[in-house]
Image (cartoon, rainbow, N blue to C red):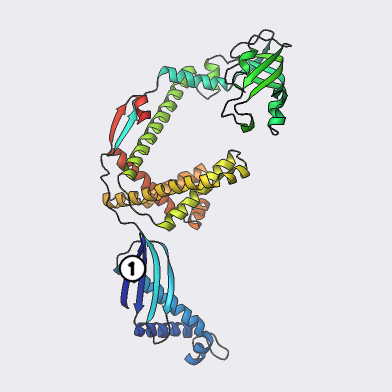
Amino acid sequence: MIVNITVENLAPCKKLLRVEVDAKVVDESFEAITKDFQKQAALPGFRPGKAPRAMVLKKYEPEIKAEVKRKLIGDSYRQAVQEKKISVIGYPDIEEIQFGRSQALQFAATIETAPEFQLPEYKGLPARREAKSVTAADVDRAIELLAKQHIKFETVARELRAGDVSVVNYTGTCDGKPITDTAPTAKGLTEQKNFWVDAASDAFIPGFADQLTGAKAGDRRTVNVDFPADFVTKQLAGKKGAYEVEVVEVKEKILPAMDDAFAKKYEAENLAKLREGVERDLENELKYSQAKAVRGQIIRALLTATNFDLPETAVAHETRNVVYDIVRENTQRGVARDLIEKQKDEIYSAAAQSAKERVKLSFLIQRIAEKEGIQVSQDEVLKRVQSLSVAYQIPLEKFLKDLQKRNGVAELYDQIAHEKVLAFLEQNAKIEAVPAAAAKAG
């Protein structure tokens, strides 16, 4: 079918494929497509499929020509790629050079290709695992956090102590003027009524609560503060402030009794069972965090073990995905749109670097999977689909259809393969158990 194929390297991961198809093959294709049109053509005065060839050609010549070109270019392109053993990424950019009846078809395809590289040694990658276990003290702290979810605040007629909460009215100044003169949007820092402040050094503005210790309801105090250099309101960072404060109430925090009744609030039979459940949850969290840390180190070691050129289109596509994720996360956190816009250069720079690492890792993972024969079965994908449909509370059939519409099933295959390769790398890694400080340093 193909007379000639040439391949030119335009850039790393980019090639120009030139293809020529014999004129005889072109004419044979015209003949076959014309017959197909004859079989289906319905022209006035003729039964379907019985119209003369000349009339069919006159009416459908543009459509016949377009179909011949589409089929010939598609078939010959696939054949050329297969013969030259080119691993293509994405879609080709096709340029028609010559096409017509009794002419050789000539076209050029600009294509991006998978990078060529030697796999580094991926077995025995170094990693450190924090030598840590869940202790009784860890369980105590977790139980205390649960108790704080049921804390009560009782108004008391005594002085403020550490651990209490003070309810205050205040007005604030900076350089002798209302704070809003310096920071127009900081109305809440200028004046508040019935404001709750924990009696802790780091509460509200550092040092504010410390100066209220010992005060009772009805007392008034002048509180002087130094706004930190990294204070959230930039106009006040590093400046001094003064507050006129009236203590309205002193509230003591009352924790619930640690007994079986408390345990039942968390659907535990008794306090002992609650501790067992908390300990089990903490152990699972520890295992997860340790595994995540180890895999992060393995990925970093794998990425630094080799360097190769990456397809520009793949990196650009992944960069857009990362930028979208960063913007979405910042928006959900309440970051203003104009602030995101101001930081767009930094966001893009960070996204581009992250995208390069993701694309590079995907090629490494794919090659390791091929070399080690790591595959994903349909059953594994179906189980993942079922678990996701349950998690999102979407009927299985609808969830599967939605996935198929956006090519999500293929993404699940890749995701599961990625997880299996990482599990393989972890099983074959050289993992050293080290004290917590050393694990963090590493």
Residue 441 at x, y = what percent?
36, 29
Name the foreground residue: 20 vs 207: 207
Q: Residue at x 56, y 23 (%)?
A: 265
Q: Is residue 278 above or below residue 69?
A: above
Residue 116 lies in quadrant: bottom left
Name the foreground residue: 303 vs 76: 303
Q: Quadrant of the N terminus?
A: bottom left
The 10 Å Cα crowd at callout 1, few under 14, some 14 to 19, many 20 or more, is few
Q: Does residue 62 appear to the left or right of 110 in the view shown?
A: right
- Report if residue 278 is visible in the image: yes
Query: Circle 1 is placed at which residue position?
Result: 8
Residue 263 at x, y = what percent?
52, 20
Residue 182 lies in quadrant: top right
Residue 99 at x, y = what percent?
42, 81
- Report if residue 325 is visible in the image: no
Helix, strand or loop under label 1: strand
Q: Which residue is outermost to the top? A: 158
